[in-house]
């Protein structure tokens, strides 16, 4: 008399294991039945139902066979277990095969509701600082300026000395500097992260003869406590124009045209006296925004000592120089009140531009 398996609850398909010994033929029947159902399946939902019917963790027909092996003698257990596992692998492979067929026949979007509203794909875009820098460069190029770039790591000579700010000069306190921890050069002094883009004035004049007009966009660094209007890094555009008859009137004309084109309207501006070691006279330019004057850039006529350091004859050549804070321009144009927002990479803020 065949050995019976203990009583088990019925499966969803109505299969009972009551006083019945499962054998290889029974497993074969399950396999063939599953194969026919898979072949007839016409949707991915039907395939999912077939998988659950035969292979579900708790109620699958073939799963129940595998769980019942513990009640069989060792010899029968090995024989039936091998057949059941082969049937399981076969069913999984057939389901995967049929799934690929359905996807090729009906496309990968067979489960998509084509009547649902479309969803626009988000695409990346330029950072607001990058947009403003490109816009400013374009305007200055239209005004005849060439775009020059220089190193972010500078030396004391180009960052200070050549710009009429010698060692121990009180004006050096105006620039809180990040110095690089490496031996100083006897001629160039210590290395540092540039505090402004002005060093490229001297670098460019050393290698080029006047007349010239250039802008130098780039990132600068200062050891400051970050707040709404200051950060340890910022973008600046340096400008320089040199010729035999350059005057403050030329500077005013260039700035007025730049500001009008940048803000795309007639902008009211004013010049007031100031002090910078590398210009004489020096002045600052304010722009009227929402009925308030906002300090926008520093400028002045190039100091004779700067010309001498670059190898120019200050008796013959004259020029003006200016420095514009790009971050300040963006804040003015879009009425942003905190410079730190540009560097926090909050996507909710950046998406507005």
Image (cartoon, rainbow, N blue to C red):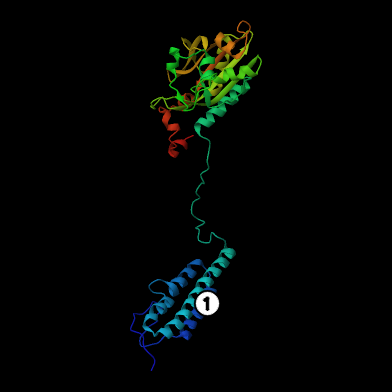
Residue 118 sits above or below residue 62 on the image:
above
Pinpoint residue 174: horizontal percent, then vertical percent. 43, 17
How would you rate the neighbour count of disc 1 (Cα within 10 Å): few for under 14, some for 14-19, many for 20 or more? some
Which residue is the extreme one toward the bottom?
A: 1
Q: Count up the numbered dots.
A: 1
Q: Secondary structure at mark 1?
A: helix
Pinpoint residue 240: horizontal percent, then vertical percent. 58, 17
Pinpoint residue 319: horizontal percent, then vertical percent. 59, 11
Measuring 53% from the left and 35% from the top, which residue is drawn there? Answer: 126
Residue 311 sits above or below residue 176 on the image:
above
Between 317 and 265, the one nearer to me in the picture: 317
Measuring 50% from the left and 10% from the top, which residue is drawn there? Answer: 282
Residue 89 visible in image: yes
Q: Which residue is mark 1?
A: 35
264 vs 77, left or right, is right
Pinpoint residue 184: horizontal percent, then vertical percent. 50, 23
Measuring 46% from the left and 71% from the top, which residue is drawn there? Answer: 51
Residue 146 falls in image quadrant: top right
Residue 76 sits above or below residue 241 on the image:
below
Which residue is the extreme one toward the top?
A: 315
Residue 293 visible in image: no
224 vs 314, left or right, is left
Quarter of the figure with the N terminus = bottom left
């Amino acid at each position: 008399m065949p050995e019976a398996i203990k009583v088990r609850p019925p499966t969803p398909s109505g299969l009972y294991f009551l006083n019945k010994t499962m054998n290889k033929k029974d497993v074969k029947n399950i396999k063939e039945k599953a194969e026919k159902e898979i072949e007839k399946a016409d949707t991915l939902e039907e395939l999912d139902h077939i998988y659950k019917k035969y292979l579900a963790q708790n109620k699958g027909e073939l799963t129940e066979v595998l769980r019942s092996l513990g009640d069989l003698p060792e010899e029968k257990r090995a024989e039936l277990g091998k057949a059941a596992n082969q049937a399981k692998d076969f069913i999984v492979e057939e389901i995967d095969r049929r799934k690929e067929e359905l996807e090729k026949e009906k496309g990968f979007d067979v489960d998509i509701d084509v009547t649902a509203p479309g969803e626009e794909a988000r695409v990346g875009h330029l950072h607001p600082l990058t947009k403003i820098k490109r816009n400013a460069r374009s305007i200055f190029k239209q005004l005849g300026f060439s775009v020059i770039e220089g190193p972010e790591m500078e030396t004391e000579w180009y960052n200070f000395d050549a710009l009429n700010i010698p060692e121990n000069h009180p004006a050096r306190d105006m620039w809180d500097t990040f110095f690089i921890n490496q031996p100083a050069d006897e001629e160039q002094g210590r290395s540092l992260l540039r505090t402004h883009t002005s060093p490229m004035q001297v670098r460019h004049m050393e290698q080029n003869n006047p007349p010239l007009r250039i802008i130098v966009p780039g990132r600068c660094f200062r050891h400051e406590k970050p707040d709404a209007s200051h950060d340890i890094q910022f973008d600046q555009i340096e400008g320089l124009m040199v010729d035999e008859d350059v005057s403050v009137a030329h500077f005013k004309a260039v700035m007025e045209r730049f500001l009008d084109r940048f803000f795309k309207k007639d902008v009211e501006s004013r010049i007031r006296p100031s002090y910078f070691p590398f210009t004489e006279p020096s002045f600052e330019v304010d722009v009227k925004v929402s009925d308030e004057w906002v300090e926008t850039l520093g400028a002045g006529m190039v100091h004779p000592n700067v010309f001498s350091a670059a190898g120019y004859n200050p008796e013959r050549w004259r020029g003006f120089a200016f420095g514009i804070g790009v971050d300040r321009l963006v804040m003015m144009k879009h009425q942003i009140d905190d410079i730190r927002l540009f560097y926090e990479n909050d996507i909710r803020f950046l998406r507005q531009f």
